[in-house]
Amino acid sequence: MTQTTMSLPCERPAAKAMGFALAAIVLAALVVAPFLVYPIFLMKVLCFALFAASFNLLLGYTGLLSFGHAAFFGGAAYATAHAVKVWGLPPELGLLAGVAAGALLGLVIGFLAIRRQGIYFSMITLALSQMFFFFCLQAPFTGGEDGLQGVPRGFGLGVLDLSQPLAIYFYVLAVVLIGLFAIWRIVHSPFGMILKSIRENETRATSLGLSVGSYKLAAFVMSAGLAGLAGGLKALVFQFATLTDVSWQMSGEVILMTLLGGIGTVAGPLVGAALVVSLQNYLATSAFPVTVITGLTFMVCVLLFRRGIVGEIAHRLRRRG
């Protein structure tokens, strides 16, 4: 008993050290990656990794399953594209416009949805997301079915020419790292601890005097704003924003990425996003349907990794420890 008690304080620093070491290795790999892999593909992975991580903040740490997260992703893509192309704003202000648009949409949709729980909450988010999809289809400033095309990338911080592949890659990498760090801080803050308590036992949290509805809405808005940051980045990288970004299929993709990687883990959505985007990219020219391969991959992961890839690996490492 004494031996077990004394070993616990040593295990936590060791786990933290391992986590920081892995993060340093991944960061080093990302710095070297554009010299070995097509930068546009890497930037797509980074954008969707941030999108999945923002969704995981809502599902993995708050326990709220949204079927309409594409509204924030795509809405921010339209806002950033419009701000940069029509208003002539620099990319930083365009991204801030996207974050603001995503957060505002999150405030409206979240205010209406959090009044319900479970599947009713999910269906309300899906319905409101579809309403926003048809708004984007009809609104004159979105370009309808053609979307907003020819979005200029401009100059990052006023000096960095984002038309150069390496320049925009490291710009996107920096923004994504800032977004991921923000999510990490939220999760490991007292606010994040409250979100986890709401996820585990909402009734108990209410009995302790916590304003559960307010915390849920705050988490929803934060998640929407960070999803908006990912959508704005995607608009700058690919220089267009289309209806695909606000479709229900996009909401399904981010759910799939999070489930594959591991719900409630920091690195899980990143791994899931990399896996799904890689399958879509490298199987796009294949005669075999990409959706079938993705479905089979999901089935295998569900059967072998019930907690997701990262979640299952972390669980087995804890058991061995």
Image: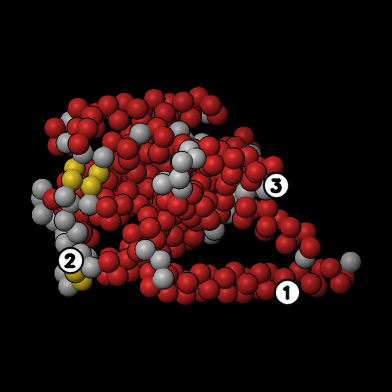
Disc 3 is placed on an element classified as helix
**Number of numbered markers:** 3
Q: Residue at x 63, y 72 (%)?
A: 18
Question: Is label 2 or label 1 in front?
Answer: 2
Relative side of 283 to 76, left or right: right
Quadrant of the image containing the N terminus: bottom right
Neighbours of disc 3 within 10 Å: few (<14), some (14-19), many (20+): few
Residue at image location 46% in from the left, 41% down from the top: 287
Q: Position of residue 50 (x, y in %)?
A: 42, 54
For the residues marked 2 and 1, what is the alpha-carbon distance in whole angstroms? 47 Å
- In the image, what residue type sits under mark 3? Leu
The residue singled out by tag 3 in the image is 304
Q: Choose the circle earlier in sequence order: 2 or 1.
A: 1
Residue 106 vertical position relative to residue 91 in the rendered view, above or below: above
- Reading the chain from its start, which is encountered first: label 3 or label 1? 1
> What residue does disc 1 label?
10
Q: Quadrant of the C terminus?
A: bottom right
Residue sitting at the far front: 287
Residue 266: image x %, image y %? Answer: 54, 57
Which numbered circle lies on residue 230? none
- CB within 8 Å, label 2 to label 1: no
* 33 shown above or below 55: below
Mark 3 or mark 2: which is in front? 3
* Residue furthest right in the image: 1
Label number found at residue 155: 2
